[in-house]
């Protein structure tokens, strides 16, 4: 366990998209997102968390590269204060085996490469954005560095 809270491991990332279906299309086609569940949510518990009554939400749970990613839609963020219910996420990084193949795939899918590919300390990377402006760094580690798990 780590820290005062006793963190044992990373659980998942939550992204609040404006359009769940557009985000799913992007993540499925480009990053191989595997949908595990797709549910409508509502009720007093959700109303309490969001801070308003009658919320009709949607939660899609899936995997990207073996890591859990949830898309959570809680309605109009201006309709109340759902813990600020801000959209998106600042960004995250995924690792690939071949940076050039990944860049070609982005180009083929009409996804602009914002910067790179460039090399820093043996890591090749480039940046793209999802439909909600979440920055995604695509990274190829140096030879001999594992493609999954934490870097040492």
Image: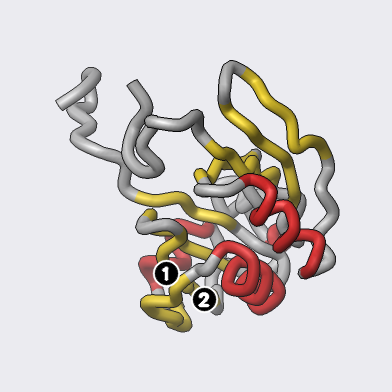
Q: Decide which of 29, 46 is in the foreground and name it.
A: 29
Q: Is residue 3 above or below residue 62?
A: above
Checking the image for residue 74, the label placed there is none
x then y, percent, for residue 47: 47, 66
Q: Is residue 77 above or below residue 5?
A: below
How are the colours assigned in the image? secondary structure
Residue 42: image quadrant is bottom left
Q: Decide which of 43, 21 is in the foreground and name it.
A: 21
Q: Quadrant of the C terminus?
A: top left
x then y, percent, for residue 135: 69, 44
Residue 28: image quadrant is bottom right
Give the class, few, some or many, for how many residues have Cα within 10 Å of label 2's Cα (few <14, many ≥20): some
The residue under the point 36% across, 37% down is: 146
Give the class, few, some or many, for how many residues have Cα within 10 Å of label 1's Cα (few <14, many ≥20): many
Does dot 1 land on a helix, a strand or a loop?
strand
Residue to which mark 1 is pinned: 61
Q: Decide which of 82, 92 is in the foreground and name it.
A: 92
Does dot 2 land on a helix, a strand or a loop?
strand
Q: CA distance from mark 1 to mark 2?
A: 10 Å
x then y, percent, for residue 53: 53, 71
Q: Is residue 64 above or below residue 33?
A: above
Residue to which mark 2 is pinned: 58
Q: Decide which of 102, 111 is in the foreground and name it.
A: 102
Q: Nearer the viewer, mark 1 or mark 2?
A: 1
The residue under the point 47% across, 82% down is: 40
Q: Is residue 31 visible?
A: yes
Q: Are marks 1 and 2 in contact (CB under 8 Å)?
A: no
Q: Is residue 26 above or below residue 37?
A: above
x then y, percent, for residue 8: 19, 35
């Amino acid at each position: 366990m780590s820290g005062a809270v006793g963190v044992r491991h990373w659980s998942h990332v939550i992204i609040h998209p404006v359009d769940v279906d557009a985000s799913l299309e992007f993540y499925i086609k480009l990053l191989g997102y595997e949908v595990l569940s797709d549910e409508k949510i509502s009720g007093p518990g959700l109303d309490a968390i969001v801070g308003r009554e009658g919320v009709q939400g949607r939660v899609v749970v899936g995997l990207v590269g073996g890591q859990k990613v949830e898309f959570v839609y809680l309605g109009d963020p201006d309709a109340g204060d759902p813990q600020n219910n801000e959209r998106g996420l600042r960004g995250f990084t995924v690792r690939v085996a071949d940076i050039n193949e990944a860049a070609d795939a982005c180009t083929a899918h009409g996804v602009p490469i914002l910067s790179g590919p460039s090399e820093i300390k043996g890591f090749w990377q480039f940046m793209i954005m999802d439909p909600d402006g979440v920055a995604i760094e695509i990274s190829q580690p140096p030879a001999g560095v594992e493609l999954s798990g934490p870097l040492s």
